[in-house]
């Protein structure tokens, strides 16, 4: 789950992390009033979307007068901001964050995330703040500081001080920087974040340490421990198809191919997409229907897949375990009759009640193409997609 920057700032405040003065606005008039109230001579006006790269996309601008604040906000609010992370359609901007300008003397990158290879949380830091950390890692790997954190002991004072020292933070405020890092760690672990990224973390001329920009995402599997986060969800920032799938209880991610996939199990879904790629095709989606698929859920999945105009073939790959093949077959038949199937449908079934499932499909009278293996199914799907 992703949230907006202004929401993440409030969470940081809850954990006593010092943040610069800023307020969120929903209109140009409100933005101007905020700038006037927080004072200063220069302000940053920042589009609020669930994506990075806002600065390069024109979503972060400096205003040097109250009139500039109003004009920039008017251009941003109601627009769609396109960045490297949004795709060509962009993301809708309904709010802007107005932040008082600061006299910055140092900028750093700081990120907390989970290293899946090490199976440990890590702190990534770099003196190249404000830059894309991927470029820094590729071009200047020696400038990346990586600290593996003991998940039980947490980020210790010596570890945090070492990071501050390696970032060349002035000695007289290294302790303050270390304290901010420890508070950020506390936020990360307490809120079950999958990512907490500060880019940049700044030092000002009056020797204050602030997170100037924050990105925060949460582990969906831990949201049950944080019901308060539900109200922070912004459905406008989600892909409409993915949102529809989520409401239907489906694990769905929209891709850019023309072969739609319906699979039970995340690992099997990944293998299905890999096999399609192996034979030269492109999957249109990741769709894990789960282990307890009802006919209603299967129907919803077919409706979503067939609503994508680029889809030329549907490939269903089922391994019958908890969810038996005959139950899935009944769901497929019912779904096909409900949605009026308009593209070739290839089904590969293996597992519990496989024979019964295949009989149901065979006797349905529907033009369903059976496949004996995943390779056979993927090859057929790729060939048919190329023909259409």
Image (spheres, rainbow, N blue to C red):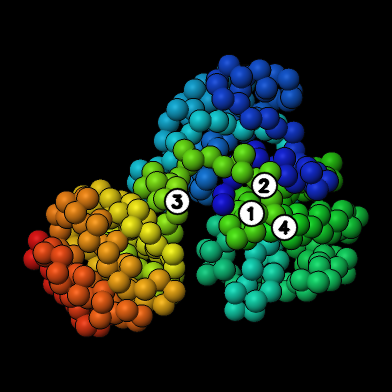
Residue bearing the label numbered 4: 188
What residue appears at the point 84 percent right and 41 percent down from the top-left corner? 206
Q: Secondary structure at mark 2?
A: helix
Residue bearing the label numbered 2: 227
Contact check, label 2 and label 1, Cβ < 8 Å? yes
What residue appears at the point 60 percent right and 74 percent down from the top-left corner? 116
Q: Position of residue 139 (x, y in %)?
A: 53, 69
Above or below, 69 against 232 in this view is above
Q: CA distance from mark 3 to mark 2?
A: 17 Å
Report whether 29 appears left or right of 107.
Answer: left
Mark with earlier residue (3, 4) = 4
Residue 223: which numbered mark, if any? Answer: 1
Query: Pointer 2: residues within 10 angstroms few (<14), some, or many (20+)?
Result: few
Contact check, label 1 and label 3, Cβ < 8 Å? no
Tell me which corner region of the image, top left, top right, bottom left or bottom right, holds residue 124.
bottom right
Mark with earlier residue (3, 2) = 2
Nearer to us of marks 2 and 4 is 2
Contact check, label 3 and label 4, Cβ < 8 Å? no
Nearer to us of marks 4 and 1 is 1
Mark with earlier residue (4, 1) = 4
- Closer-to-camera residue (39/182): 182
Q: Secondary structure at mark 3?
A: helix
Residue 246: which numbered mark, if any? Answer: 3
Picture quarter with the C terminus: bottom left
Query: Pointer 1: residues within 10 angstroms few (<14), some, or many (20+)?
Result: some
């Amino acid at each position: 789950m992703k949230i907006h920057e202004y929401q993440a700032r409030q969470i940081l405040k809850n954990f006593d992390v010092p943040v610069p003065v800023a307020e969120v606005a929903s209109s140009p008039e409100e933005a101007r009033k905020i700038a006037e109230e927080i004072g200063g001579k220069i302000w940053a006006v920042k589009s609020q979307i669930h994506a990075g790269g806002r600065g390069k996309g024109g979503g972060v601008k400096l205003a040097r007068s109250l009139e500039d604040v109003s004009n920039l906000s008017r251009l941003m609010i109601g627009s769609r901001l396109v960045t490297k992370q949004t795709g060509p359609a962009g993301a809708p901007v309904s709010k802007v964050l107005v932040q008082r300008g600061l006299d910055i003397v140092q900028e750093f990158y700081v990120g907390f995330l989970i290293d899946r290879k090490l199976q440990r949380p890590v702190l990534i830091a770099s003196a190249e703040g404000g830059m894309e950390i991927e470029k820094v890692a590729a071009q200047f790997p020696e400038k990346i500081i990586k600290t593996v954190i003991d998940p039980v002991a947490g980020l210790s004072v010596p570890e945090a001080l070492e990071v501050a020292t390696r970032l060349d933070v002035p000695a007289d405020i290294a302790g303050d920087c270390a304290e901010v890092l420890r508070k950020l760690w506390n936020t990360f672990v307490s809120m079950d974040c999958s990512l907490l990224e500060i880019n940049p973390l700044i030092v000002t001329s009056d020797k204050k340490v602030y997170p100037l920009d924050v990105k925060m995402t949460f582990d969906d599997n831990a949201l049950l421990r944080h019901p308060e986060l539900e109200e922070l969800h912004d459905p406008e920032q989600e892909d409409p198809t993915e949102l529809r799938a989520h409401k239907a209880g489906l694990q769905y991610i929209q891709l850019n191919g023309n072969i739609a996939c319906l699979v039970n199990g995340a690992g099997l879904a990944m293998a299905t997409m890999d096999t399609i790629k192996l034979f030269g095709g492109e999957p249109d989606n990741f769709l894990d229907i789960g282990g307890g698929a009802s006919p209603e859920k299967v129907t919803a999945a077919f409706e979503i897949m067939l609503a994508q105009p680029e889809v030329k073939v549907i490939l269903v790959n089922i391994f019958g375990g908890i969810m038996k093949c005959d139950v899935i077959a009944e769901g497929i038949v019912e779904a096909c009759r409900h949605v009026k199937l308009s593209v070739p449908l290839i089904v590969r079934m293996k597992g519990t009640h496989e024979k019964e499932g295949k009989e149901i499909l065979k006797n349905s009278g529907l033009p369903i193409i059976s496949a004996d293996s995943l390779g056979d199914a993927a090859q057929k799907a790729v060939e048919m997609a190329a023909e259409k």
